Image (cartoon, rainbow, N blue to C red):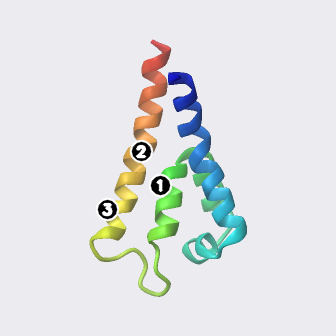
Amino acid sequence: MCCLLAVGSFIGPRVALILAWLFTSEVDQAYSGFWVPFVGLILLPWTTLMYALAYAPVIGVTGFWGPVLVVLGLLADLSSYGAGSRARR
């Protein structure tokens, strides 16, 4: 069960980011090129996804909830990397 949770947290945000990239314009609006979301897809998928969802055209990530979502995404990425290293020990 724990392995399924680890695999789901590893693959889940990547699938969600790919689907958002293919079927919505959120990722294209938030990032101007191809490489930043692609590298984010590989290294920090939760952060990349949350930034794309919190981004508002013209004004960027503002307000209270925008930066909070991005920080939560970063914490989710860091915790998934930390859980992987802890499981290896």
Q: Quadrant of residue 10?
A: top right
Q: Position of residue 9 (x, y in %)?
A: 53, 39
Q: Residues within 10 Å of mark 2 (few under 14, many from 20)?
A: some
Residue drawn 53% across the image and 59% down it: 49
Q: Residue furthest left?
A: 64
Foreground of the two, 28 or 4: 4
Q: Can you name the residue that lies furthest to the top here? A: 89
Locate residue 20, reporting x and y percent. 64, 64
Residue 81 x/y as whole percent: 47, 33
In the image, residue 60 above or below residue 58: above
- Contact between marks 1 and 2 (CB within 8 A): the answer is yes
Q: Which residue is mark 3?
A: 68
Q: How many marks?
A: 3
Element under label 3? helix
Between residue 77 and residue 11, name the one nearer to us: 11
Q: Residue furthest bottom?
A: 58
**Residue at image point 68% right, 60% down:** 19
Q: Estimate how packed mark 3 is, as few (under 14), some (14 to 19) or many (20 or more) residues with alpha carbons within 10 Å.
A: some
- The CA distance from mark 2 to mark 3 is 12 Å
Image coordinates for residue 37, horizontal then vertical, percent: 61, 60
Q: For the residue marked with disc 2, what is the amino acid?
A: Ala
- Find disc 2 in the rendering and name its residue: 76
Tell me which label, 2 or 3, sits earlier in the chain.
3
Q: Secondary structure at mark 1?
A: helix
Q: Of the numbered discs in the image, which one, if any, rests on residue 47?
A: 1
Amino acid on which the number 1 mark rests in the picture: Thr
Is 35 situated above or below 59? above
Which part of the image, by quadrant, shows the C terminus?
top left
Q: Secondary structure at mark 2?
A: helix
Asked if residue 20 lies left or right of residue 30, the reply is right
